[in-house]
Amino acid sequence: MQGNTDTVVIRGGAVITVDNDRRILDPGTIVVEGDRIVSVDKPARIEAEYEPDIEIDASDSVLLPGLIDSHGHAGHALTKGLGVGSEGGWMNAVQDVYFHSSTEEFWQAESYLAALEHLEMGVTTSLSFPGSSPRVDDPKYSIAASTGYADLGLRHIVNVGPPNPPYPKSYTDGATGTEQSADLDDAIATTATVIDELDGAENGRLSVYVGPSGLVPEFVEDGERKPAGLVGDSFVFCDGEPSEMSVRQLEQVVELADAKGTKIHTHAFGGQVKAAAEAVPEVLSPDLSLAHCSALTSEELELMAEHGVSASHGPLTHAYARARFPLVEALDAGVNVAVSTDGAAPDRSFDLLSQGRIAAQLQRAHCNDTSLLPYGKIIEMMTIDAAKALGMADEIGSLEPGKKADVIGISLESAKLRPRTALSHRIAHYASGADTDFVMVDGNVLVRESKFDSVDVESILSEADRVTSETFERAGVMDRLDGSPNAWHETRF
């Protein structure tokens, strides 16, 4: 996508800057030159100082920094609802799809559908693993999973790294039927290749982080190696010594990230932060962000705060249902916390705005305290705090001079967002991603007046349908789309 070289003036109905002063300008105007914001101010001051090449009227919208989804999974956009309520559930059903039946075409079609939904929801930056855990037998799958984001003009992080042990892992190329295995060394080599291929591509819009599936995925208890964290439908607290393989894997992850100058993002659950601190202490740094963080202890929250490790909290994930992330306690301890979606399956969407207020309500209900998580904090956790979690706060997450021109508009032309008062409260508690009517990334307008710029929506949707059907047939999971016989009238599946 070609960069914009004009001076663009966006006249908003209001601007929620999320800058250091948390200014709210009503009305407000943003000036963009190239891919950067050069001014955010009242209209009269802008008009006196700048002669625009292009003027954009967003006076019926509230302008915000582009939303940032700091944790998700590629593949999920095509597997929504698959196997839900069936024996083994969704997670069991997608294993055959992701690791034994998928092709480059599958990951490419999924990336276009996911990128389109991000655009619809005002999410301009996102991170995703290629699979429920990373598929690492060949770099081509991760590369294919980036294509839709690159082509549609979004900012995206491909998160790839070693899956959880034991090794080797077995995979099948869905196109050829060729079987292949991968051990830890193969996973590290695949990750290094993806970094070399993609990191910094598309004018810096694409990044690659080292993403092991788990921080300390395996431990030793009574002489036996056992998985830790979310294991199937159970939650296992990491208690005991990390296994030799877990330590070796974490050491290689840190070494690779350091050598490539990139960051680390992974899942973490109770006991794993403490175990990592004891085994490979250098992993704890501002370059590390952790998803879920369910059942972390107060000691682990203190470790995260001390070393600048961020948390990415998905309020609608199965991990949160199994064990609570102590979000309020984390914030009180000084941990930077972002709200994320965890992907678009099995039962959620990329509507990050709605998940922000769900995160707040869950904490209020748990703590019996309606004062928790004010509307401003909710917005911060999807913008500047999420940017900090990904190590990008110097570039994105707020609307201020010098930062990348990633801007969204939320339309005020609906009953739920009126009367036109208390706009930050309206955005945090009433708006949804579907209210997005303007998107700019890197200074390029991608959505204007709810219309996509140069995006063939019909082609993306039809290709997603075709590829999903062919992949599910190949995987033999079509019968798991019929739903559970207990879906109606019953209390549980």
Image (spheres, rainbow, N blue to C red):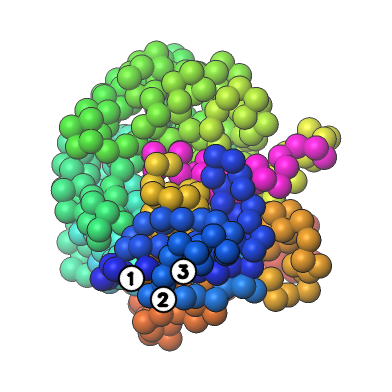
Q: Which of 371 and 478 is in front in this view?
A: 371
Total numbered circles: 3
Left or right: 244 in relation to 465: left
Disc 1 secondary structure class? loop
Residue corresponding to mark 3:
9
- Give the CA distance from mark 3 to mark 1: 10 Å
Instruction: State which quadrant residue 298 falls in.
Output: top right
> Which amino acid, by three-letter code, is at mark 3?
Val
Location of residue 281 by image quarter: top left
Disc 1: which residue? 6
Q: Give the range drawn in magenta.
A: 370-392
Q: Which residue is drawn at 57% across and 47% down?
A: 18
Quarter of the image that includes the C terminus: bottom right
Q: Observer-nearest residue: 196 or 421?
A: 421
The answer to whether residue 438 is magenta is no
Looking at the image, do the residues carrying marks 1 and 2 touch, with CB atoms under 8 Å apart?
Answer: yes
Under mark 1, the amino acid is Asp
Q: Can residue 103 be seen in this view?
A: no
Percent x, y of residue 129 = 37, 50
Is 14 placed left or right of 303 in the picture? right
Q: Which mark is residue 54?
A: 2
Q: Residues within 10 Å of mark 1 (few under 14, many from 20)?
A: some
Callout 2 crowding tier (Cα within 10 Å): few <14, some 14–19, many ≥20:
few
On screen, residue 240 above or below 154: above
Q: Height in image: 268 above or below 136?
A: above
**Of the pair 335 and 80, the residue shown nearer to us:** 335
- The disc label shown at residue 77, or none: none
How far apart are labels 1 and 2 at the CA level? 7 Å
Do the residues bearing badges 2 and 3 touch, measured as CB atoms within 8 Å?
Answer: yes
Q: Where is residue 149 in the image (x, y as percent from the top left)?
A: 35, 65
